[in-house]
Image (cartoon, rainbow, N blue to C red):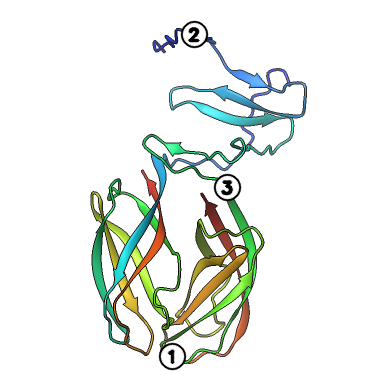
Amino acid sequence: MGSFSANTNPATSTTVVQMCQVYRVDYTIPTLSSNAGAASTVTVTGLTTNSVLILTPRQQNNSSVVGVTVEPRCSTVNELSLQIVNGSGSSITGSTQSGYLLQFAF
Amino acid sequence: MERRSTNDIGYVHYQGDVTAQVGSSHGVRLSGGSTGGVVEAVGDDTNVTLTLRQQGAGGIQIGRGSTTGFLKIERYRIDYTVPVLSSNSAAASTVTQAGLTTASILILQERQQNNSSVVGITIVPRCSTVNELTLTFYNNSVSSVSGSTQSGYLLQVSF
C-alpha cells in the first residue's frame, strides 16, 4: 500500500463521546389510574445532564397490564428522572421493576 | 508532542504513523494530529471496515470511567405485526430474532409510520428471553387501527 493515505470513510463524525456506560436500575411503578402519568427519581451515580439515555425494561412494566411506559432523563447530576405513563384503560397498583439504562455521555 | 512514555519495562516512540498489514489488502493505522489520536482502517479499496474486537468473553470499554464491557453492537431488520388496537390501548407480541440476549439495550427504529393512516402508534422493544424480541404496541391516538405488517431496524447493544 505504500503511502496510500486517503480517508477510507466519508462519513465523518464530529461528536466526541466521553463515555458509554450501562447501569441496571430498579424503579418503582406507582399506583396509577388509567391514562395517567407520574414522575419519580432514582439515584444513579455517574449520570450527567448532557447525556443521552436509553432505558430497556427487563420485563413488562406491570405483571398483568400491558401499556405502561417509562421514559428516562437526567434531571441533575447523579439523578435519573423517570416519567411513567399508564396508557392502558386499566388502573394499576404499584410495583418494583427494573431495566438496563444505557448512557452516552458527551 | 512532548508527552513521552516512561514505562520501566520499555517503550517505542514513532515520529509518524504506524500501519499494519501492508502486505494484504486491508489494514489498520495509528495516526494523529491537531484534533486527536486516530485508529482507522486503511486499504486500497474505497471502503474498508474497521473492527474493534475483544478476546474471548472480554468486553470493550468506551471512555474514561466506564466500567461496562460491551460485547457487541448488532443491527437487525425485523418484520412485525401491529395488532388490531382500539383507541388508547396497548398489546404485546413476540418475534423470534436469533442473537438477542436478555442483557441487551434495544433500540427500535421504524422504517415507516406504524399505521398507514393513523398517527400515534409507538413501540417499545425488550428481550424477553434469549432469541426472543417482545414488542409492546401503544395506540395513543383516538382512532382504532386494524392490523398490519410493518418493519424496522433493531439496534442491539449487548454487554
For marks 1 and 2 on the same chain, the one whose residue lies earlier in the sequence: 2
Q: Residue at x 57, y 47 (%)?
A: B72
Give the x, y percent position of residue B8: 45, 7
Q: Viewed as shown, does residue B65 lie left or right of A80?
A: right
Give the letter of the chain under mark 1. Answer: B
- Badge 3 marks a residue whose secondary structure is strand
The residue located at (29%, 69%) in the rendering is A28
Q: CA distance from mark 3 to mark 2?
A: 33 Å
Q: Is residue B115 above or below residue B33?
A: below
On residue B33, which mark appears?
Answer: none
Q: CA distance from mark 3 to mark 1?
A: 38 Å
Answer few, some or many: residues within 10 Å of disc 3's Cα (few below 14, many 20 plus, some between 14 and 19).
some
| Residue type, numbered disc 3 | Lys
Asked if both marks, 3 and 1, belong to the same chain, the answer given is: yes
Residue type at numbered disc 2 = Ile
Labelled disc at residue B72: 3
Q: Which residue is mark 1?
A: B87
Sequence-earlier tag: 3 or 1: 3
Corner quadrant of residue A53: bottom left
Give the quadrant of the N terminus of chain A.
top right
Residues tagged by mark 1 and mark 2 found on one chain of the structure: yes
